[in-house]
């Protein structure tokens, strides 16, 4: 049944598109057909993945697969790290939840999934799935073959790995196409981190793995739309054709596993370093703000972010009574990375947040659009296309805005649908 919360979410979709149009480099070239098509593709994908007969069985299988991967990874982590990764404890345990260690119980998942992703790419399984989505985006959203393939690759690979898939075409892409690739890369997540997010949320959100997977898929069309609004393509330019023979190749299955593990290790190290630095910086700011009080509490970065992002959270279809905590999570995602935001979302007690709000926040948080990713994006693309580094630097902050708003738009599209679609 349609409710005021659904109307809020519809308003959120209009708001996101309108704000991006106001910031557009060419407001006269608003892509009306793409706007209608992108929202339709998003809604259609969500309905196809949740509402069609048998979809719940597929989602249950995905959840089972993720649980199996988590258990298998935990065995490897326990072999290396022992009791730090949940192995037999050498002392009596009085507070079992305190045994959770992010570094030893979540990050190892990234290593395993990164290796498996490389192997599936070498076996051409993931490659053909990516090509299928590429053709879908090419036919339905009017993208050039190279851009469509990069967008599809972003759903499963990282925001730096996906440009490697079309490395031979990067120097031929227009400014608008490079911007589009950046926005979609920030609006989606890699397959390796999807499983980690699902593992964090599975105790508190039914079908967590399915929601995280769908979130990354349906944010891609939103990223395409907002990128085209912010920096429209010049008529007659773009549309570089790709022959779909990727430059991302491995010599053998063992080579794929070894290189995938090495790539995963770099991701783990980057995540660890960024989390340490950004959490420390926020803590430092909180110390400096410690002498200020407002509304019967000390002023902190988290409280300020909650106030700033409260209206945006409400526009995704969240109850106003929960918009404060939801807004704080959006702010944490932007400043401290989505990993911290997902950990905090998973730690919210069931009685303090409804299942609807938790689900909507899963979609809104599921993207690499955070300040730390700006540096990763610039560094990665500067290596791949050094001659266009200044161009990338000039667009990266606008790309961060587009990627962040794309996940908000995705949450609004999901929020506009009746909860019955999701089996609740």
Image (spheres, rainbow, N blue to C red):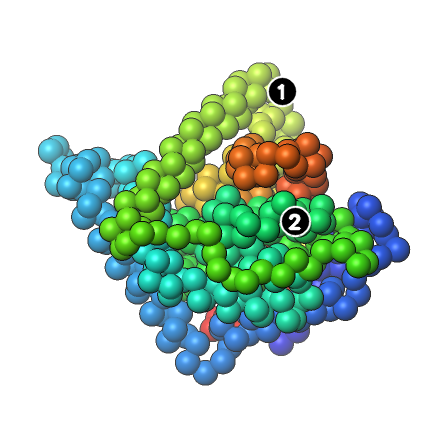
> Of residues 46 and 322, which is closer to you in this image?
46
Disc 2 designates what residue? 172
The residue shown at (47%, 56%) is 246
Going from the N terminus, do you reach mark 2 or mark 1 first? 2
For residue 289, above or below residue 401:
above
Give the labeled residue for mark 1.
Answer: 292
In contact (CB < 8 Å): disc 2 and disc 1: no
- Residue at position x 54%, y 39% in the image: 384
Residue drawn at (41%, 80%) of the image: 54
Tell me the crowding category of disc 2: few under 14, some 14 to 19, or many 20 or more residues within 10 angstroms, Cα based: some
Say what secondary structure mark 2 lies in: helix
Name the side, left or right, on which 390 lies relative to 96. Answer: right
Pinpoint residue 375: horizontal percent, then vertical percent: 56, 32
**Gap between marks 2 and 1 measured at Cα:** 53 Å
User: Could you say where residue 369 lies in the image, as x and y percent from the top left?
Assistant: 58, 43
Q: Which residue is drawn at 66% across and 62% down?
A: 143
Which sits in the foreground, 6 or 379? Answer: 379
Q: In which quarter of the image is residue 377?
A: top right
Q: In this view, does 22 lie to the left or right of 386?
A: right
Q: Residue 82 carries which label?
A: none
x and y, in percent, of residue 305 in the image:
62, 36
Check the image and report above or below for 264 versus 44: above
Left or right relative to 5: residue 245: left
Residue 317 seen in render: no
Residue 252 picture location, percent across and down: 28, 54
């Amino acid at each position: 049944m349609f409710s005021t919360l659904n109307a809020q979410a519809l308003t959120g979709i209009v708001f996101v598109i309108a704000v991006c149009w106001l910031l557009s480099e060419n407001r006269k070239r608003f892509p009306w057909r793409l706007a209608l098509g992108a929202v339709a593709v998003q809604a259609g994908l969500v309905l196809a993945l949740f509402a069609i007969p048998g979809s719940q069985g597929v989602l249950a299988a995905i959840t089972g697969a993720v649980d199996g991967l988590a258990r298998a990874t935990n065995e490897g982590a326990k072999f290396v790290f022992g009791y730090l990764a949940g192995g037999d404890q050498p002392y009596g345990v009085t507070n079992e939840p305190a045994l959770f260690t992010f570094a030893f119980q979540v990050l190892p998942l990234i290593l395993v999934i990164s290796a498996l992703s490389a192997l599936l790419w070498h076996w051409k399984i993931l490659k053909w799935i990516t090509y299928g989505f590429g053709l879908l985006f090419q036919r339905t959203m009017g993208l050039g073959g190279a851009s469509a393939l990069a967008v599809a690759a972003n759903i499963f690979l990282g925001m730096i790995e996906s440009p490697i898939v079309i490395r031979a075409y990067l120097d031929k892409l227009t400014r608008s196409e490079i911007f589009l690739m950046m926005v979609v890369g920030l609006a989606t997540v890699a397959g390796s981190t999807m499983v980690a997010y699902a593992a964090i949320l599975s105790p508190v959100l039914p079908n967590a793995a399915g929601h995280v997977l769908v979130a990354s898929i349906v944010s891609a069309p939103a990223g395409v739309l907002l990128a085209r609004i912010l920096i429209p393509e010049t008529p007659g330019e773009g549309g570089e054709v790709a022959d779909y023979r990727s430059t991302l190749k491995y010599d053998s299955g063992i080579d794929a596993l070894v290189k995938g593990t090495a790539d995963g290790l770099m991701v783990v190290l980057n995540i660890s370093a960024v989390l340490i630095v950004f959490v420390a910086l926020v803590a430092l700011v909180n110390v400096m703000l410690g002498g200020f009080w407002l509304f019967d509490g000390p002023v902190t970065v988290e409280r300020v972010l909650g106030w700033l992002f409260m209206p945006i959270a409400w526009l995704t279809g969240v109850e106003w009574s929960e918009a404060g905590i939801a807004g704080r999570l959006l702010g944490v995602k932007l400043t401290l990375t989505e990993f911290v935001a997902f950990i905090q979302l998973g730690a919210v007690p069931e009685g303090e947040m409804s299942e609807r709000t938790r689900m909507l926040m899963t979609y809104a948080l599921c993207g690499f659009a955070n300040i730390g990713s700006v540096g990763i994006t610039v560094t990665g693309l500067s290596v791949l296309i050094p001659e266009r580094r200044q161009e990338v630097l000039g667009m990266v902050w606008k790309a961060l805005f587009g990627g962040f708003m794309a996940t908000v738009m995705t949450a609004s599209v999901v929020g506009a649908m009746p909860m019955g679609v999701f089996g609740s």
